[in-house]
Amino acid sequence: MSRLREHPHFRLNQLTGEWVLVSPHRAQRPWQGQVESVARRSEPQYDPECYLCPRNSRAGGARNPDYKETFVFTNDYSALYPLAPDQLSEENKSGLIVARSEPGICRVMCFSPRHDLTLSTMRIEEIRRVLDVWADQYSELGSLDWINHVQIFENRGSMMGASNPHPHCQIWANATIPNEPVKELRTQQEYHRRSQSCLLCDYLKLELQERERIVFENDAFVVVVPYWAVWPFEVIVISRAHVAKLPELGSQQRDGLAQTLKQITSGFDEVFQAPFPYSMGFHQSPTDKQEHPEWHLHAHFYPPLLRSATIRKFMVGYELLGTPQRDITPETAAQRLRDTLASART
Ligand SMILES: [Zn+2]
Ligand SMILES: [Zn+2]
Ligand SMILES: [Zn+2]
């Protein structure tokens, strides 16, 4: 195993069934790519120009209330909207041109009235409130008979396309289970059928034994750089308990998740001494009104940074046309994140 890890090898992502190429020997090569300047703007507590700050008006004319904690509203530029019940579709004779309409609901959620905060700088009680609202939103949207999946996700940083620094996330709920969760549904169902146990419960047990890729843990959650990570500092946040969705978490588990999110996001900010961009999101069981004994609640963080606050990884070339590839190994990345979190705590 240790010799394999010094040479190019493929690793299998158990959740998607896809492979990633790991090339540890390339981590030493000189870099001659793009160097970006670091966005280190300090934000004001309130920005009169921000469409998410309390009391401000949004494009389209709506005015935000003077909210004190969190605030959820329907996206003024929703990617999906609820359609009339008769669905539209298109398919030509050869079956090569296929489309169908997709109903859905897109909401925006502000984490805080403060324009200058982020998950990494919010207090744990404030993060706890955010995840209580996430759980309620999932339950409310998921209970609609035509909503079969609810995706909660956050894009942080302009590098990830976040158009506004105000701390917020998006909630997209729709009729069809999207590509990534569908892959994870199939792999988890298949594992459950084959082994009569849960894929992520078993994987977590293994990581807790090996302890090579664990970044942070508390009584409720464990943060791991997955064995099959694609992005340099990608992590997966796994519930210790076998639960399928946020609403199933008890009060102590929710406090544990709030602490976990605070630790990992503030740890990320320490890695390159700069606000760490990422896309993150929770994968909860589909809301298709079926039983999902196979599904295990988790969150993914996909940060693009590679070697500094200015050097990012792009998914290009072989990655677009072949298979994703990484140089720094998941074990090295986990060590680095673990050390960073440990030194941040002392
Ligand atoms: Zn704002
Ligand atoms: Zn499980
Ligand atoms: Zn997932």
Image (cartoon, rainbow, N blue to C red):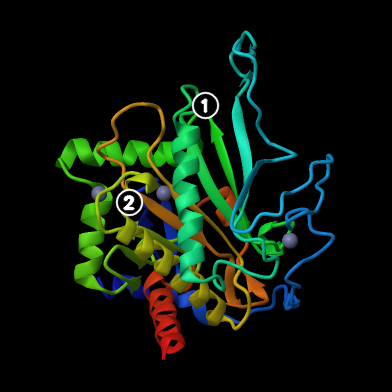
- The residue that disc 1 covers is 175
Residue 89 picture location, percent across and down: 63, 14
Identify the element where label 1 is drawn. loop
* Residue shown at the point (63%, 69%) measured from the top left: 117
- Beta carbon of the mark 2 residue lies under 8 A of ligand 2: no
Judging by the rendered image, the residue that carries numbered circle 2 is 249
Residue at the spot 29% in from the left edge and 35% down from the top edge: 292
- Of tags 2 and 1, which is closer to the observer? 2
Q: Residue furthest bottom?
A: 346
- Give left or right: position of 110 versus 225: right
Label 1 CB-ligand 3 distance < 8 A: no
For this rendering, which residue is in front, 158 or 169?
A: 169
Of marks 2 and 1, which one's residue comes earlier in the chain? 1
Q: Looking at the picture, does residue 336 appear above or below residue 5?
A: below
Give amino acid for label 1.
Ala
Kindly tell me whether residue 230 is visible in this rendering.
no
Q: Residue at x 26, y 59 (%)?
A: 240
Q: Amino acid at mark 2?
A: Leu
Q: Position of residue 107 (x, y in %)?
A: 62, 41
Q: CA distance from mark 2 to mark 1?
A: 25 Å
Tell me the residue at 45%/83% (across/down).
Answer: 340
Q: Residues within 10 Å of mark 2 (few under 14, many from 20)?
A: many
**Picture coordinates of residue 16, whole percent (x, y):** 40, 46
Quarter occupied by residue 192: top left
